[in-house]
Amino acid sequence: MILLVVAVITGVTCFALATAALGRPTLPFGVRVAAVRADDPAIVAQRRIYTRLVLSAAVLAAVLAVALELGALAVAVALGVADMAFYYLAYRRIRAVKRQEWWQAEHRYGVTVDTSFRTNPVRIPWLWLTPAVAVLVVTVTIGWGHRLDTVLVGTGLVGTVLGQLGATVLMPVVALLVLRARPDLDAARPVASARRYRVYLLGTARLVLLLATAINLQLLLRALPQWGLVPRTTFWTAAQFVPLGLVVLGFLYWEFRVGQAGHRLPALPGEADENTGVVQRDDDKYWFLAGMIYVNRRDPAVLVHRRVGVYWTLNLGHPVAWLVLAAVLVTALLTGLGVIDPPQRQNWF
Amino acid sequence: MHLTVDLDSDVPIYQQIRDRVVEAIARGEAKEGDPLPSTRQLAADFGINFLTVSKAYDLLRQQGVIRINRKSGAVIRRDPSSGPPEPGFGANWEDRMRILLAEATVQGISRPDVVSRCDALLAQFEAVRSP
């Protein structure tokens, strides 16, 4: 139990530190600054304070968890909320310094578009979906060969295959949305940022498709003990989380290697000198909660890259976003009232 | 084709988009027959109103730089290798150049300076075309 708590604390702390460290230098804690301000003493100080706070919270959480015998989930939630609060604090302070010292007045602002993202877009790397399809075929073959009860939904053959089919269809849709969302380029360095963003997009799309393989494998591994094909041991219970864990590790590795929007990729010859003389548009006033939520009524884009992490978010000022949210809300409400019957899930906590 | 717009400039955004497209073709970043994004798509990528992009495309179409099809959308209509300019272009262009040269003269830029600057800019465009 203690081992699990320590693992959870390490995981949450690493995630919190990586989020701050791997974000773009021009977006420290979700605040837009020019490249010349990226190493400003005020920002460096906030980075140091944030790291210290996160590490102190981790130690405190470990001590409290052992002393009070807290559960892993409670520790993870409490530590996660505390780290988010530290992040928000850093965001508030950097924004305050930026306002006080009038950093906005130092530059001309611009916005850049690379039309090749539309006329020659990054295509869905379909080859990366083959493992997912293969797992689906293997599942059907195993189920068919053993003449399993095909009517039983849930962990039965039909339920498992339907779940896998869902993942195999849904993930390419997610990849397509990500590939077609507005590219997050830097107006100060249009050529370099567009080249890097292309690499970043392709890798992210591949990982999204691999996620389908992981989900399909998990569903198969979950069903195998139920079908009586493998013993119901802890080993097989744990094994079903390995594929998803590997894909999560893949995402972390990818973010570490290329960075958010590809900013960590090495510069090609000549790229380091690129400077258009304008700085990427300052749209701080449309971003809320340290660059997590975007609301801009005048922006025609629906899906935008978030300022924090490898995520995309809806422009909550767009009517399409309202429709999507309304649909989610209605589905949740109907499920809550029992009108829609969701597939049964095993509870792991 | 990279299009960068200066939001703090006095030049209207539609004019800037039009200028950037023409420059990109001169630099060889786009050639005859290359497609352009739809007005709505380009507006979403810039984060501006689609009517602004529409206005820029309209200017480009009037000047014969692009053509707009109902089916295939906006396509580049000419580049340096598309042959001589259309009749009437020269006079219009000379009018605009007269203003630029008058400005240079008023500001005291000498004739050799004007010529050498023009040479340098043209060399940039030609360098891309004949590597």
Image: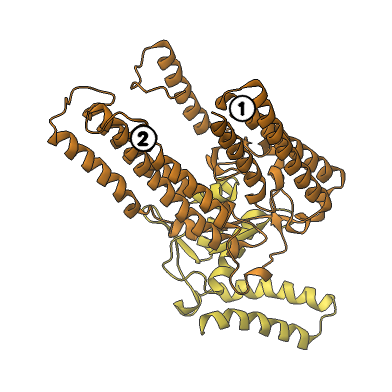
Q: State the orange chain.
A: A
Q: Quadrant of residue A274?
A: bottom right
The residue closer to the viewer here, B82 or A164, is: A164
The disc label shown at residue A75, or none: 1
The amino acid sitting under disc 1 is Val
- Residue B77, relative to residue A119: is it above or below? below
Residue B100 x, y percent position in the rendering: 73, 73
Whole-Å distance between the Cαs marked 2 and 1? 25 Å
- Residue A127, relative to residue A236: is it above or below? below
User: Mark 1 or mark 2, which is nearer the start of the sequence?
Assistant: 1
- Residue A4, relative to residue B119: is it above or below? above
The disc label shown at residue A235, or none: 2
Most extreme residue toward the bottom is B112
The residue closer to the viewer here, A199 or A288, is: A199
The residue closer to the viewer here, B1 or A221, is: A221
Q: State the yellow chain.
A: B
Respond whether the residues carrying marks 2 and 1 are from the same subunit: yes
Q: Quadrant of residue B122?
A: bottom right
Q: Residue at x 75, y 56 (%)?
A: A108
Count residues near mark 1 (Cα–Cα under 10 Å), then give few for <14, some for 14-19, many for 20+: many
Q: In the image, is A135 to the left or to the right of B55?
A: left
